[in-house]
Image (tube, rainbow, N blue to C red):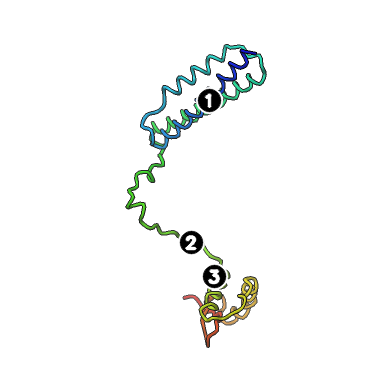
Amino acid sequence: MNDRVTILRELGEVEQELKELEILYEQYFAGVEKREPVKQREALARRLRRFVNRRIIQTDARFRYQTLAARYHSYASHWDRILRLIDEGRYHRQTAHMKQTPAAAAEPVAVTAPPVDPCEKIYQDLVAARQSCGIAGPPPDPRQVALFLENQKDKIREKFGDREVEFRVEIEDGKPKIKVRAKK
């Protein structure tokens, strides 16, 4: 029983060291730390190797050791791969945001809006025009606007043929109206 408690306590310490080592490597790869945490990695590897020849009878403790060893080896291969990429000059750290000066960070950045559905844009323009004209009541349903534009396609084809057209909302006699015109 005493051996079991000792093993589980040591495995808990190994797990904590592995978490700390993972954080140190992430900081190193991000450019926060200037040196690779080689000493901590070697100490953890040495500590895990002590368990290799140790006979662990308890299944749960043996499983925990095997899981920790597998995690360490997985992380080690990941770290080695990134270190190799750094040596080859093919790894680019995401440090651009850390080097920004406060003045540069305060500058507004132009954000492009996602493309808007033409029916949605017409609907938004129609609602805005209703508000600017002071028309009370609930706005039209967006599906009604889309259905109206769909029904107008035949009339538009007769008038403009296969040319591209655009819809816009205009205010006539204090009322918003949807107009169509051929694109140039």
Q: Secondary structure at mark 2?
A: loop
- Give the residue at x 41% y 24%: 38
Q: CA distance from mark 2 to mark 3?
A: 12 Å
- Give the residue at x 54% y 25%: 15
Q: CA distance from mark 1 to mark 3?
A: 54 Å
Q: Position of residue 110 (x, y in %)?
A: 41, 59
Q: Secondary structure at mark 1?
A: helix
Label 3 Cα crowd, 10 Å radius (few <14 / some 14-19 / many 20+): some
Q: Quadrant of the N terminus?
A: top right
Amino acid residing under circle 2: Ala
Q: Earlier in the sequence, mark 1 or mark 3?
A: 1
Quarter of the figure with residue 58? top right
Extreme residue toward the right, this view: 59
Q: How many marks?
A: 3
Q: Report which residue position mark 3 lands on.
A: 121
Label at residue 113:
2
Q: Vertical placement of 22 versus 136: above or below?
A: above
- Give the residue at x 41% y 42%: 94
